[in-house]
Amino acid sequence: MIKVSKWVVALALGAIAVNLSSCASIPKGAVAVRPFDQQKYLGKWFEIARLDFKYEKNLNNVTAVYSLKDDGKIRVENRGFDYMKNEWKESIGKAKFKGSPEVGRLKVSFFGPFYAAYNVLSVDDNYQYALVAGKNLKYLWILSRQTTIPDNIKSKYLQHAESLGYDTGDLVWVEHNK
């Protein structure tokens, strides 16, 4: 019989708890889109702006393509050009709803069983522009079906983010030129 250290069990349970809590989170005061239409959200999005973090550092021409998989999960294909290394980077992941598919709260994974929060905070009626948050004020994205976004939508999304406590002055505005 295999004897497992209680420390190993404690660490494993702790990691699971952190993973579960992080994918369940939404920034304080934020409300996800309801009703949310998964079919309208699928397809290609261009990243217009983001709060930078290590996996997207030095990336421009960033896109995300969402497609439905046979098992009901969503395939996530992120792609961007690393202008420092002069090379394309791509990451394939999966997403699933955190609760009802009528609410824009999902969890996304690019690394095995570890999920991160993906909260759609705002989307226009035609699903051409979206404001997306992670679990806290460190993660924010503005997305568009085109490589640009109208000033009135940009202003609306920036005001929404600021009302939640985001420092929109820290946003990285993504260039699309390749």
Image (spheres, grey):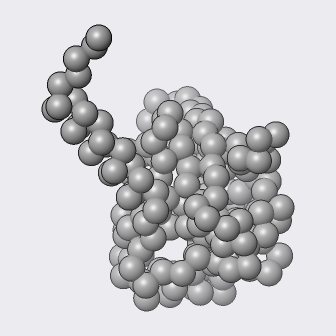
- Work out whether residue 124 can be spotted: yes
106 to the left or right of 147: left
Quadrant in the rendering for residue 2: top left
Residue at 34%, 50% in the rendered image? 17
Please report the residue visible at 63 percent of the width from the left and 43 percent of the height from the top. Answer: 94
**Toward the viewer: 115 or 6?**
6
Image location (x, y in percent) of residue 93: 61, 39
Residue occupying the point 17% across, 31% down: 6
Left or right, 66 with reference to 81: right
Say above or below: 108 vs 91: below
The answer to whether 4 appears left or right of 125 in the picture is left
In which quarter of the view is residue 39 placed? bottom right
**55 or 71: nearer the eye?**
71
Residue at 56% across / 50% down in the picture? Answer: 108
The x and y percentages for residue 72 are 76, 47
Percent x, y of residue 97:
64, 59
Residue 178 vs 1, above or below: the answer is below
The percent position of residue 14, horizontal first and vertical second, equals: 27, 45
Quadrant for the N terminus, please: top left
- Can you see residue 58? no
Query: How many labels were placed on the picture?
Result: 0
